[in-house]
Image: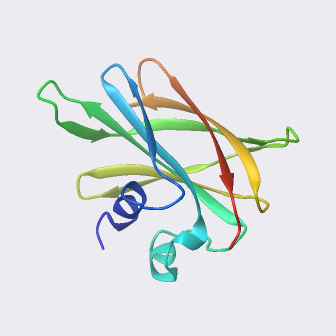
Amino acid sequence: MRVVLMLLLWFTAGCTLAESQKFGEYTVHYIAVNSTFLTPEIAGQYHIVRSKRAAFVNIAVLHNNPDGSTTPVTAKLSGGRTNLMQQTGPIPFVEIREDKSIYYIGQFDFSNAEILRFKIDVQPEGKGETRVIEWTTQLYSD
Protein backbone atom coordinates (compact mmCIF):
# COMPACT_ATOMS: atom_id res chain seq x y z
CA MET A 1 0.00 0.00 0.00
CA ARG A 2 2.42 2.64 -1.15
CA VAL A 3 1.52 6.24 -0.53
CA VAL A 4 -1.88 5.10 0.74
CA LEU A 5 -1.93 7.37 3.78
CA MET A 6 -1.00 10.47 1.86
CA LEU A 7 -3.47 9.79 -0.94
CA LEU A 8 -6.28 9.10 1.50
CA LEU A 9 -5.68 12.42 3.20
CA TRP A 10 -5.16 14.62 0.18
CA PHE A 11 -8.23 13.37 -1.67
CA THR A 12 -10.62 13.09 1.25
CA ALA A 13 -14.18 14.04 0.49
CA GLY A 14 -15.86 15.11 3.68
CA CYS A 15 -15.68 17.63 6.48
CA THR A 16 -11.91 17.90 6.74
CA LEU A 17 -9.94 18.95 3.69
CA ALA A 18 -6.23 19.38 3.23
CA GLU A 19 -4.97 22.93 2.98
CA SER A 20 -1.80 24.39 1.53
CA GLN A 21 0.34 27.50 1.66
CA LYS A 22 2.87 28.60 -0.92
CA PHE A 23 6.17 30.11 0.25
CA GLY A 24 8.24 31.19 -2.75
CA GLU A 25 9.56 28.03 -4.36
CA TYR A 26 7.87 25.71 -1.82
CA THR A 27 4.30 24.62 -1.12
CA VAL A 28 3.36 23.11 2.25
CA HIS A 29 0.29 20.83 2.38
CA TYR A 30 -1.21 20.11 5.80
CA ILE A 31 -4.21 18.55 7.48
CA ALA A 32 -5.32 17.48 10.98
CA VAL A 33 -7.53 14.38 11.12
CA ASN A 34 -9.15 12.17 13.74
CA SER A 35 -7.28 8.86 13.68
CA THR A 36 -10.52 6.85 13.38
CA PHE A 37 -10.65 8.11 9.80
CA LEU A 38 -8.01 5.45 9.06
CA THR A 39 -8.72 1.77 8.84
CA PRO A 40 -7.06 -0.33 11.56
CA GLU A 41 -4.72 -1.82 8.92
CA ILE A 42 -3.46 1.54 7.67
CA ALA A 43 -3.13 2.96 11.20
CA GLY A 44 -1.08 -0.10 12.16
CA GLN A 45 1.13 0.17 9.09
CA TYR A 46 2.08 3.75 10.01
CA HIS A 47 2.14 3.19 13.81
CA ILE A 48 -0.70 5.66 14.34
CA VAL A 49 -2.74 5.26 17.52
CA ARG A 50 -6.33 4.77 16.43
CA SER A 51 -8.79 6.11 19.00
CA LYS A 52 -11.78 8.44 19.02
CA ARG A 53 -9.72 10.90 21.11
CA ALA A 54 -6.50 10.62 19.06
CA ALA A 55 -5.68 12.63 15.96
CA PHE A 56 -2.71 13.37 13.77
CA VAL A 57 -1.28 16.08 11.55
CA ASN A 58 0.02 15.14 8.10
CA ILE A 59 2.41 17.62 6.43
CA ALA A 60 4.13 17.40 3.04
CA VAL A 61 6.58 19.95 1.60
CA LEU A 62 6.98 20.25 -2.16
CA HIS A 63 9.50 22.21 -4.21
CA ASN A 64 7.78 24.10 -7.06
CA ASN A 65 9.84 23.44 -10.18
CA PRO A 66 10.11 25.99 -13.03
CA ASP A 67 8.24 23.63 -15.39
CA GLY A 68 5.18 23.61 -13.10
CA SER A 69 5.86 20.18 -11.60
CA THR A 70 6.62 19.60 -7.93
CA THR A 71 9.21 17.52 -6.10
CA PRO A 72 8.79 16.27 -2.52
CA VAL A 73 11.55 17.53 -0.22
CA THR A 74 12.61 16.87 3.34
CA ALA A 75 11.96 19.47 6.02
CA LYS A 76 12.62 20.24 9.66
CA LEU A 77 9.33 20.62 11.54
CA SER A 78 8.54 21.80 15.04
CA GLY A 79 5.51 23.24 16.75
CA GLY A 80 2.29 22.27 18.39
CA ARG A 81 -1.30 23.05 19.17
CA THR A 82 -3.26 25.32 21.50
CA ASN A 83 -6.91 25.02 22.55
CA LEU A 84 -9.33 27.80 23.47
CA MET A 85 -8.31 27.54 27.14
CA GLN A 86 -4.72 28.32 26.05
CA GLN A 87 -3.53 24.82 26.93
CA THR A 88 -0.63 23.98 24.67
CA GLY A 89 1.10 20.81 23.62
CA PRO A 90 4.03 20.06 21.32
CA ILE A 91 3.58 17.72 18.38
CA PRO A 92 6.53 15.42 17.63
CA PHE A 93 6.83 14.57 13.93
CA VAL A 94 7.98 11.37 12.25
CA GLU A 95 9.23 11.38 8.66
CA ILE A 96 7.68 8.84 6.29
CA ARG A 97 9.18 8.03 2.88
CA GLU A 98 7.46 5.92 0.25
CA ASP A 99 8.83 5.76 -3.26
CA LYS A 100 9.33 9.42 -4.14
CA SER A 101 6.92 10.75 -1.50
CA ILE A 102 8.06 12.38 1.75
CA TYR A 103 5.65 13.47 4.45
CA TYR A 104 5.50 13.96 8.19
CA ILE A 105 3.04 12.62 10.76
CA GLY A 106 2.56 14.10 14.24
CA GLN A 107 0.13 12.51 16.72
CA PHE A 108 -1.78 14.18 19.57
CA ASP A 109 -4.86 13.73 21.78
CA PHE A 110 -7.93 15.98 21.78
CA SER A 111 -11.33 16.42 23.44
CA ASN A 112 -14.61 16.10 21.53
CA ALA A 113 -15.57 19.23 19.59
CA GLU A 114 -12.29 20.87 20.61
CA ILE A 115 -11.15 23.82 18.54
CA LEU A 116 -7.39 23.64 18.07
CA ARG A 117 -4.98 26.24 16.72
CA PHE A 118 -1.87 24.76 15.11
CA LYS A 119 1.39 26.62 14.67
CA ILE A 120 4.13 24.65 12.90
CA ASP A 121 7.58 25.91 11.88
CA VAL A 122 8.67 24.42 8.57
CA GLN A 123 12.22 24.64 7.24
CA PRO A 124 12.26 23.12 3.72
CA GLU A 125 15.28 20.94 3.00
CA GLY A 126 16.58 21.77 6.48
CA LYS A 127 18.20 25.02 5.36
CA GLY A 128 17.33 28.60 4.67
CA GLU A 129 14.32 30.47 5.95
CA THR A 130 11.84 28.85 8.33
CA ARG A 131 8.22 29.32 7.29
CA VAL A 132 5.32 29.27 9.75
CA ILE A 133 2.00 27.64 8.97
CA GLU A 134 -0.95 28.35 11.23
CA TRP A 135 -4.50 27.09 11.02
CA THR A 136 -7.49 26.30 13.20
CA THR A 137 -9.51 23.08 13.11
CA GLN A 138 -12.35 21.66 15.17
CA LEU A 139 -12.07 17.93 15.78
CA TYR A 140 -14.83 15.56 16.83
CA SER A 141 -14.66 12.13 18.41
CA ASP A 142 -16.76 9.45 16.76
Residue 72, position as x, y percentages in the image: 29, 42
41 horizontally vs 6: left or right? right
Q: Residue furthest left?
A: 67
Q: Residue furthest right?
A: 85
Q: Residue furthest front?
A: 14
Q: Is residue 135 above or below residue 142?
A: above
User: Can you say which quadrant of the picture contains the C terminus?
Assistant: bottom right
Residue at image coords 50%, 31%? 122
103 horizontally vs 16: left or right? left
Residue at image coords 71%, 68%? 141
Residue 86, position as x, y percentages in the image: 85, 38
Residue at image coords 63%, 61%? 55
117 horizontally vs 70: left or right? right
User: Can you say which quadrant of the picture contains the N terminus?
Assistant: bottom left
Residue at image coords 43%, 59%? 9
Q: Is residue 33 above or below residue 72?
A: below
Residue 45, position as x, y percentages in the image: 45, 74
Name the foreground residue: 79 vs 114.
Answer: 114
Tell me the colour scheme of the image. rainbow
Q: Is residue 108 above or below residue 134?
A: below
| Quarter location, residue 111 | bottom right
Q: Is residue 129 above or below residue 79?
A: above
Residue 93, position as x, y percentages in the image: 56, 49
